[in-house]
Image (tube, grey):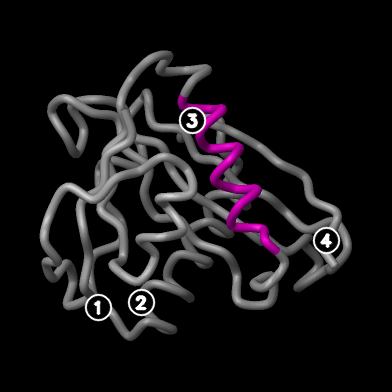
């Protein structure tokens, strides 16, 4: 059963310190610890003035006196990671919220956010290769061979 969620879309300067902590903790818990991928998660892209952080807190489950963050991604403006495209990255669902189709809800919200803030722009992503069909569901098409990014197989995908 999908948890009751509170969704937010914020720029870096509008994040509270607790939200920033929760976002970074989730990203490190999944990308660094769970996936055993040791890379510098913190980069200058997070605090770019036109980067948007889309995230959801579960209102049903309380952890450490705070609501639990369930899902997150960031939307990067054109010229940040790709010269000619905006990008979606750091897509993550907390382990305890998987299997509830929350990733689909997150991606639908991401695409609406892209259209709101970057209307008509194409979106390029670097997707983990095993998620190709998931991203194809949302209009992304593979445009590269498999390559290693942080020792994990990835593919470039584009949505026009």
Residue marked by disc 2: 32
Dot 4 or dot 3, earlier in sequence: 4
Q: Are marks 1 and 3 in contact (CB under 8 Å)?
A: no
Dot 2 or dot 3, earlier in sequence: 3
Q: Disc 4 and disc 2: Cα gap in Å?
A: 25 Å
Q: How many marks?
A: 4
Residue marked by disc 4: 3
Dot 4 or dot 2, earlier in sequence: 4
Residue marked by disc 3: 11
Residue ranking furthest to the top: 119
The residue at the point 36 percent across, 77 percent down is: 32
Q: Are marks 1 and 2 in contact (CB under 8 Å)?
A: yes
Q: Nearer the viewer, mark 4 or mark 2?
A: 4
Dot 3: few (<14), some (14–19), or many (≥20) neighbours within 10 Å? some
Q: Secondary structure at mark 3?
A: loop
The residue at the point 36 percent across, 24 percent down is: 49
The residue at the point 14 percent across, 66 percent down is: 146
Reply above or below: 52 against 90. above
Q: Are marks 4 and 3 in contact (CB under 8 Å)?
A: no
Residue segment shown in magenta: 101-114
Dot 4: few (<14), some (14–19), or many (≥20) neighbours within 10 Å? some
Q: Secondary structure at mark 2?
A: helix
The magenta stretch spans residue 110: yes
Q: Disc 1 and disc 2: Cα gap in Å?
A: 5 Å
Q: What secondary structure is the stretch in magenta mostly built from?
A: helix
The quarter of the picture where the N terminus appears is: bottom right
Image coords of residue 132 (percent x, y): 35, 61
Dot 4 or dot 1, earlier in sequence: 4
């Amino acid at each position: 059963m999908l948890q009751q969620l509170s969704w937010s879309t914020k720029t870096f300067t509008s994040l509270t310190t607790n939200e920033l902590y929760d976002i970074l903790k989730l990203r490190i818990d999944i990308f660094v610890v769970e996936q055993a991928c040791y890379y510098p998660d913190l980069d200058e892209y997070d605090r770019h003035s036109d980067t948007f952080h889309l995230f959801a807190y579960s209102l049903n489950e309380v952890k450490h006196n705070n609501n639990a963050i369930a899902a997150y991604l960031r939307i990067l403006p054109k010229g940040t990671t790709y010269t000619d495209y905006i990008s979606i990255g750091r897509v993550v669902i907390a382990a305890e919220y998987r299997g509830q189709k929350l990733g689909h809800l997150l991606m639908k919200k991401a695409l609406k956010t892209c259209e709101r803030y970057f209307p008509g722009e194409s979106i390029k992503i670097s997707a983990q290769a095993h998620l190709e069909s998931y991203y194809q569901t949302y209009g992304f098409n593979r445009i590269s061979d498999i390559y290693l990014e942080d020792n994990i197989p990835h593919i470039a995908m584009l949505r026009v």
